[in-house]
Image (spheres, rainbow, N blue to C red):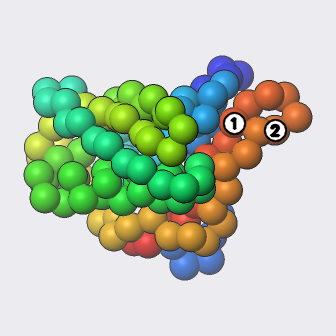
């Protein structure tokens, strides 16, 4: 198994998203937000959007990052398939690469309304991998 991946986890009403990676930034970049909506493999990298966030701790920074992605997806009518994240102190600088939604090709399953504080965790496991997770409202 790769040391970088995304996955969904069970939650009663909404959908849990988790990213795992060797650094906190890698874990943030792997959070499976697009996979809630469509198969990320169907999203072509045609445009890159810069995103900046700031928060007092990693958990709130994750929520801000995900909500910034939701904002960009909603206002630009885009889906993203590649993410790059760097974190310095309380600041996150990231990019999201994707394309305008094509309903016929992407067949969106749900609309993500926002990241929540439910199940919100950013932690390093016993194998040295970082996990970043929360539940998103759909």
Q: Do the numbered discs 1 and 2 sit on residues whose CB atoms are within 8 Å?
A: yes
* Numbered badge on residue 125: 2
Q: Which residue is mark 1?
A: 130
Q: Secondary structure at mark 1?
A: strand
Rendered location of residue 55, percent (x, y): 48, 55
Residue beneath the point at 20% across and 36% down: 49
**Drawn side of residue 131 relative to residue 33, left or right:** right
Question: Which residue is more in the foreground, 108 or 32?
Answer: 32
**Drawn side of residue 123 relative to residue 14, left or right:** right
Would you say residue 36 is visible in this rendering?
Answer: no
Dot 1 surroundings within 10 Å: few (below 14), some, or many (20 or more)?
many
Would you say residue 23 is visible in this rendering?
Answer: yes
**68 lies above or below 79:** below
**Drawn side of residue 119 relative to residue 46, left or right:** right
Residue beneath the point at 81% across and 38% down: 125
Rendered location of residue 64, percent (x, y): 42, 57
Q: Quadrant of residue 99?
A: top left
Q: CA distance from mark 1 to mark 2?
A: 6 Å
Q: Quadrant of residue 67?
A: bottom left
Residue beneath the point at 56% across and 70% down: 117
Rendered location of residue 71, percent (x, y): 24, 59
Question: Which residue is more in the foreground, 56 or 43?
Answer: 56
Dot 2 surroundings within 10 Å: few (below 14), some, or many (20 or more)?
few
**33 lies above or below 130:** below
């Amino acid at each position: 198994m790769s040391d970088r991946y995304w996955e969904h986890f069970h939650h009663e009403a909404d959908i849990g998203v988790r990213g795992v990676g060797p650094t906190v930034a890698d874990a943030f970049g792997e959070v499976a937000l697009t996979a809630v909506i469509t198969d990320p493999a169907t999203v072509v990298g045609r445009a890159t959007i810069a995103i900046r966030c700031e928060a007092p701790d990693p958990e709130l920074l994750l929520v801000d990052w995900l909500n910034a992605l939701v904002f960009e997806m909603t206002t630009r009518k885009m889906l993203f398939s590649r993410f790059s994240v760097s974190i310095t102190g309380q600041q996150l600088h990231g990019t999201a690469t994707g394309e305008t939604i094509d309903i016929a090709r992407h067949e969106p399953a749900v609309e993500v309304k926002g990241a929540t504080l439910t199940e919100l965790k950013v932690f390093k496991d016993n194998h040295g991998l970082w996990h970043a997770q929360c539940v998103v409202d759909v």
